[in-house]
Image (cartoon, rainbow, N blue to C red):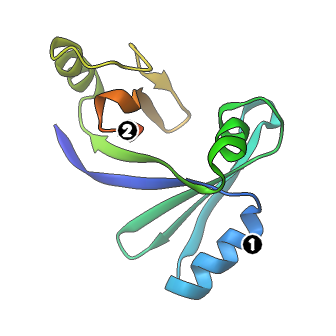
């Protein structure tokens, strides 16, 4: 079952500038900074109260974040919904005939994730995440 919005993800040109902007404007604090596989991107997870924001800056060309930045500029990349059973959510979506970007969850160090194709959600890329 979907429990809440886990985070909102934004692609940016300059992550340090974006971190400062969100901190100055709304009091966001950095929770974690990490580099993506193969040094393709850097991400920063920030929070302000119960709101979590993840910023992504591509470091290499020809990956999904760099293509996004080239085509659309900085902006909203995806919305992440927390679930307690990612496999059940994926099965339900498949049964509804929804297009998925991931048929099976991707194992991350601290979570499982899967993406729903934007065509299934009115043009919005949705990430499902099961933490723990």
Mark toward the viewer: 1 or 2: 2
> As displayed, is residue 31 above or below residue 122?
below
Q: Secondary structure at mark 1?
A: helix
> As displayed, is residue 112 above or below residue 57?
above
Q: Earlier in the sequence, mark 1 or mark 2?
A: 1
Q: Residue at x 43, y 18 (%)?
A: 102
Q: Callout 1 environment at 10 Å: few (<14), some (14 to 19), or many (20+)? A: few
Residue 132 seen from this side: no
Residue 4, image x, y percentages = 24, 53
Disc 1/disc 2 C-alpha distance (Å)? 28 Å
Q: In screen coordinates, is 60 left or right of 99? A: right
Q: Which residue is mark 1?
A: 17
Instruction: Find out whether the residues at labels 1 and 2 contact each other: C-beta distance under 8 Å.
Output: no
Q: Callout 2 environment at 10 Å: few (<14), some (14 to 19), or many (20+)? A: few
Q: In screen coordinates, is 12 left or right of 90? A: right
Asked where in the image residue 1 lies, by quadrant, the reply is: top left
Asked where in the image residue 36 lies, by quadrant, the reply is: top right
Residue 7, image x, y percentages = 42, 55
Q: Residue at x 38, y 76 (%)?
A: 49
Residue 131, image x, y percentages = 38, 40
Q: Which residue is mark 2?
A: 123
Q: In screen coordinates, is 122 left or right of 10? A: left
Q: Residue at x 72, y 30 (%)?
A: 63
Residue 121 seen from this side: yes
């Amino acid at each position: 079952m979907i429990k809440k919005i886990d985070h909102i993800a934004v692609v940016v040109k300059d992550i340090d500038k974006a971190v400062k902007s969100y901190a100055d404007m709304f009091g966001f604090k950095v929770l974690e900074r990490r580099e993506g596989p193969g040094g393709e991107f850097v991400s920063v997870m920030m929070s302000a109260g119960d709101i979590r924001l993840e910023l992504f800056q591509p470091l290499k060309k020809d990956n999904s974040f760099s293509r996004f930045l080239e085509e659309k500029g900085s902006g909203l990349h995806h919305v992440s919904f927390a679930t307690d059973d990612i496999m059940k959510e994926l099965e339900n979506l498949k049964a509804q005939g929804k297009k998925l970007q991931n048929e099976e969850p991707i194992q991350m160090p601290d979570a499982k994730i899967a993406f729903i194709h934007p065509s299934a959600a009115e043009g919005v890329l949705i990430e499902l995440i099961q933490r723990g």
